[in-house]
Amino acid sequence: MGTLVVFVVVTLYFLTQVVMVIARTVVVNRNMRKVNSETRSLSAQLLRDNEKLAQFVLTKAILGEISKLRAGQFDYSAYLSQIQSLIPVGSSIAGVDFQMTGIVSVRLLSGNIGYFSDLEKAIRSADLTQTSFDSVTVLSVARDKDGRYRTDVLFGIKKNKS
């Protein structure tokens, strides 16, 4: 009977250990599935974020190139607003030509010859150091068939605009 008790005790101990190993294996497998699921979720999120990051980097590069191109462009609006500030009231800009390098050619129209003298005074009194121009030259003044006066003026652009 003594050996039977030892056998039963050893068998129960062995069965308990087997149950414990099976229970631990079940818990470990469940945790592994949970970790694998979270890993897949994180991996998918990283891939989505990676796509967004790639789009952001590409967009930033494109905007950088656009900025470089714009910096190298001719600033037409700044020249036109400076020219507008130099011409007297009563004259209007009828044409602008940027084709000559370093020169902006402007055609002004006015209702009477008095505006031409106002233009001369405005040019003489203008502080060109505050503009993008280093010279202003009246090329011609003529009266059109409709009685308006046409004045062609050349504005010389400074070489190193700052």
Image (cartoon, rainbow, N blue to C red):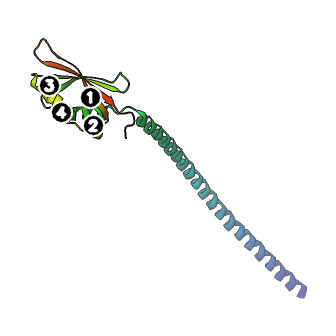
Give the residue at mark 1.
136
Tell me which residue sits at (45%, 40%) in the image: 63
* Outermost residue toward the top in this view: 145
Depth order, front residue of 127/75:
127
- Horizontal side of residue 154 vs 3, given as left or right: left
N-terminal of the two: label 3 or label 4?
Answer: 3
Q: Residues under labels 3 and 1: Cα distance?
A: 14 Å
Tell me which residue sits at (36%, 22%) in the image: 100
Identity, as a three-letter code, of the amino acid under mark 3:
Phe
N-terminal of the two: label 2 or label 3?
Answer: 3
Tell me which residue sits at (29%, 33%) in the image: 79
Local crowd size for mark 3, using a 10 Å CA cut-off: few (<14), some (14–19), many (≥20) = many
Identity, as a three-letter code, of the amino acid under mark 4:
Ala
* 77 vs 99: above or below: below
N-terminal of the two: label 1 or label 2?
Answer: 2
Local crowd size for mark 2, using a 10 Å CA cut-off: few (<14), some (14–19), many (≥20) = some
Rendering coords of residue 54 (x, y %) = 53, 44
N-terminal of the two: label 4 or label 2?
Answer: 4
N-terminal of the two: label 1 or label 4?
Answer: 4
CB within 8 Å, label 1 to label 4: no
CB within 8 Å, label 3 to label 1: no
> Which disc, if any, is residue 6?
none
Q: Residues under labels 1 and 4: Cα distance?
A: 11 Å
Q: Residues under labels 4 and 2: Cα distance?
A: 11 Å
* 69 vs 43: above or below: above
Identity, as a three-letter code, of the amino acid under mark 1:
Val
Local crowd size for mark 1, using a 10 Å CA cut-off: few (<14), some (14–19), many (≥20) = many
Identity, as a three-letter code, of the amino acid under mark 2:
Leu
CB within 8 Å, label 1 to label 2: yes
Q: Is residue 1 visible?
A: no
Q: Residues under labels 2 and 3: Cα distance?
A: 19 Å
Rendering coords of residue 57 (x, y %) = 51, 44
